[in-house]
Image (tube, helix red, strand yellow):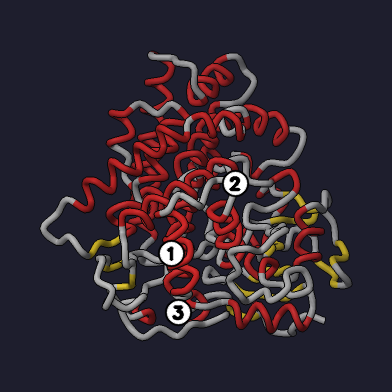
């Protein structure tokens, strides 16, 4: 049975390393009462089989209209009118509307399509690292500020057809609108300012595509709106989802992947040697490593809200209609019932049916692109940064406080060819959890 008092899913200790808590919860059962920073009480699903089942349970809807008053009173959701104008995208839609909208975006992110663009993505990675490493401070960089914060957005702009001039004006700070704060939070005015700024930017993007159409996804969305296939709110919501959810998770996943490798120096050296010697092809060690790093510490730690339209049983627990249900992807990906030695980073792990991109009808449509980006990013960073090591103490890494996501705000690393340099910049606890 779930705990009588909800467990808090927030705080520095939890965000730094949630895996001990996830292990404890998995051992106690598949469903747990939890509490989020906004004050929302929710039901958390842990364990691989339970997570897989919940992600494919057609009784669980994603539309916010299904949420009950208890959820709505405390949920840190967007204020109106932006909630109605920007939150009717794929993540918050159910069939049949979800089916129609998803079909509009899947072609742009189809595996064969994004694979053809790989050479261009490699050029972008090279350009960014050329600029980052051509500084007086050569020998130390912040991977986030120099590379990870920019590479995914530059790639996304190419894929969706965002004009270069508009792409250059995108403020990464707008991405924080996916971390909403409650109505009484002191940061609410700052949050609302970001929201208005992003909404104005989306209006510019769609107007530019109306005036200057092209053979790209953004134009396709504008045309679909003009033809009545989707509403203006749905069009703007999908653009919102592309601009924010389409790049920030990859930024975070680059950081979680590198942190995991830095905490496992032998695996880091093995992958770095393979990349340097050209032995880590996209179908070989590098591809396996990306899958394992996605499983080991996923940037999408938790899913977004799901709701039952009626009171329902979920693995023996009664869930009231409209209560929020959250699936822990990270807890599922460390389940020893599905993954042998689940807390061990094993770059040769195969098969590796992780849930880092979700499952079912809401499986991430950009999964193929994300995999390519991670392969390119790791290859570029490991090639260009020999002797890679942390430039700060492991315990000084600042993990983002976002409810659903994992990653670090900055990742200062040192690099150089000195054989005397340690594998990491400081003594690190080589944790398996």
Q: Which mark is residue 283?
A: 2
Query: Label 3, label 2: how many angstroms apart (C-alpha)?
Result: 38 Å
Q: Residues within 10 Å of mark 3 (few under 14, many from 20)?
A: few
Q: Quadrant of the C terminus?
A: bottom right
Residue that mark 3 sits on: 12
Nearer to us: label 1 or label 2: 2
Q: Is residue 73 visible?
A: no
Nearer to us: label 3 or label 2: 2
Residue that mark 1 sits on: 258
Q: Earlier in the sequence, mark 3 or mark 1?
A: 3
What is the secondary structure assignment of the residue under circle 1?
Answer: helix
Taking the image as shown, residue 23 lies to the left or right of residue 126, namely: right
Q: Earlier in the sequence, mark 1 or mark 2?
A: 1
Q: Is residue 248 above or below residue 398?
A: above
Q: Which mark is residue 41?
A: none
Percent of width and height locating residue 388: 33, 67
Percent of width and height locating residue 55: 75, 55
Query: Label 1, label 2: how many angstroms apart (C-alpha)?
Result: 20 Å
Q: Residue at x 71, y 56 (%)?
A: 306
Q: Residues within 10 Å of mark 1 (few under 14, many from 20)?
A: many
Query: Label 3, label 1: how many angstroms apart (C-alpha)?
Result: 20 Å
Q: Residue at x 36, y 64 (%)?
A: 409
């Amino acid at each position: 049975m779930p705990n009588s008092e909800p467990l808090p899913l927030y705080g520095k200790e939890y965000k730094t390393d949630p895996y001990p808590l996830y292990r404890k919860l998995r051992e106690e059962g598949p469903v747990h009462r939890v509490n989020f920073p906004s004050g929302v009480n929710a039901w958390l699903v842990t364990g691989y089989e339970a997570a897989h089942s919940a992600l494919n349970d057609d009784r669980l809807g994603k539309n916010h209209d299904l949420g009950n008053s208890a959820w709505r009173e405390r949920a840190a959701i967007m204020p109106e009118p932006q909630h109605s104008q920007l939150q009717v995208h794929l993540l918050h839609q159910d069939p049949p509307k979800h089916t129609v909208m998803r079909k509009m975006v899947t072609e742009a992110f189809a595996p064969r399509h994004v694979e053809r663009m790989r050479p261009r993505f490699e050029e972008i990675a090279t350009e960014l690292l050329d600029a980052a490493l051509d500084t007086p401070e050569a020998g130390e960089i912040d991977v986030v500020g120099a590379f990870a914060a920019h590479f995914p957005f530059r790639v996304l702009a190419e894929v969706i057809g965002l004009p270069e001039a508009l792409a250059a004006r995108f403020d990464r700070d707008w991405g924080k609108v996916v971390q909403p704060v409650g109505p009484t939070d002191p940061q609410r005015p700052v949050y609302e300012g970001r929201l208005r700024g992003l909404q104005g930017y989306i209006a510019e993007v769609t107007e530019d595509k109306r005036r200057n159409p092209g053979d790209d996804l953004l134009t396709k969305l504008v045309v679909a709106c003009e033809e009545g296939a989707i509403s203006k709110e749905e069009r703007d919501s999908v653009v919102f989802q592309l601009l924010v959810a389409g790049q920030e998770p990859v930024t975070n996943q680059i950081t979680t992947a590198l942190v995991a490798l830095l905490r496992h120096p032998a695996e880091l050296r093995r992958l770095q040697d393979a990349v340097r010697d050209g032995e880590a092809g996209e179908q070989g060690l590098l591809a396996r490593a990306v899958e394992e790093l996605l499983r080991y510490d996923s940037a999408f730690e938790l899913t977004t809200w799901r709701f039952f339209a009626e009171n329902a049983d979920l693995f023996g627990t009664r869930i009231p209609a409209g209560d929020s249900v959250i699936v822990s992807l990270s807890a599922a990906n460390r389940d020893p019932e599905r993954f042998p030695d689940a807390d061990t980073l094993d770059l040769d792990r195969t098969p590796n049916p992780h849930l880092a991109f979700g499952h079912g009808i809401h499986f991430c449509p950009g999964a193929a692109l994300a995999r390519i980006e991670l392969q390119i990013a790791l290859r570029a960073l490991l090639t260009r940064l020999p002797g890679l090591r942390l430039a700060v103490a492991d315990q000084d890494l600042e993990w983002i406080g976002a409810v659903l996501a994992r990653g670090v705000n900055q990742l200062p690393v040192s690099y150089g060819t000195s054989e005397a340099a340690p594998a990491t910049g400081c003594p690190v606890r080589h944790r398996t959890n």
